[in-house]
Image (cartoon, rainbow, N blue to C red):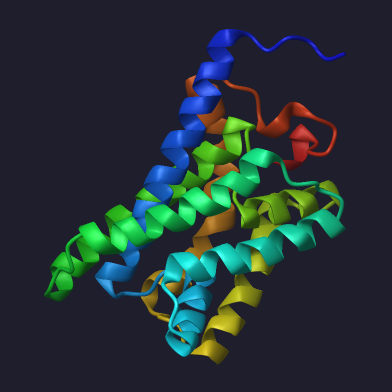
Amino acid sequence: MGARVPSGIRFRRFTLYAVGFSIAGLGIGGLLQARLGTDPFDAVNAGIGAHIGLAVGQCSWINASLVLLLAWLLGRRPKIGTVALVFFLGLMIDVGVAVLPRVSGLPGRGVEAALSLAALYLGLTSFVLSGIGAGCLEELMLSLVAKGFRLHRARWGIEVVLLALALVLRGPINVVTVLFVALTGPVLSWSIPNLASLVRVPLPDHDPEIPLGDIR
């Protein structure tokens, strides 16, 4: 039987989880409203949605389920928190699209995109650190890390494949999409251990599936 997790850490993990899916979903919604491109996964979702008439959040539920299945086949069984996150994140994306402003003018759109991208990265880092359940792409990324890939290389590979799919589907690809592909691996490699230290929670899962030396 594992050691009991202190109540303070449990509270911080739950807070990270709730804050994570909330601001990540709003961040994606803000990127869609800024119209300067979004992350490749949601560019794929938007491209599919435009073809079949579903909202981006609804498409994310379908595609996230497929990604989680792939991560499971690679040896990383999804937690109930991950499955719940698929629903909550998709819901918050649609909320973000509904409530966030559709700014006109390139400078305003640039500011909205920058703030939304920062929120998305903070959200991704938060629910990875929660230990309750990471996002579908983060679960796939961590399954590749467990197979011996460096975190930033695993993430680059995932984002490049999604970018190719978004191009085929004519999703909303622009400068933010390219930045996301280039920056996400290095940003998460930096933000995960540093936020873990700041809020005093263990690195992801603290289990043998994720060698701590490989997260950096």
Q: Of 61 and 132, which appears nearest the observer? A: 61
Task: Give x and y (percent) for residue 95.
Answer: 32, 56
Quadrant in the picture for residue 189? top right
126 above or below 61? Answer: above
Identify the residue at image location x=56%, y=27%: 196
Q: Quadrant of the N terminus?
A: top right
Q: Nearer the viewer, residue 80 or 138?
A: 80
**213 displayed left or right of 167:** right
Q: Position of residue 180 (x, y in %)?
A: 48, 64
Is residue 181 something one can see in this rendering?
A: no
Instruction: Give left or right: position of 198 versus 26.
Output: right
Q: Is residue 72 above or below residue 61?
A: above
User: Image point 38% across, 79% down: which residue?
Assistant: 174
Q: Which x, y percent locates residue 166?
A: 53, 82
Q: Residue at x 58, y 45 (%)?
A: 84
- Image coordinates for residue 99, horizontal then vertical, percent: 22, 57
188, above or below 198, in the image:
below
Q: Is residue 88 above or below residue 55?
A: above
Q: Residue at x 51, y 18 (%)?
A: 11
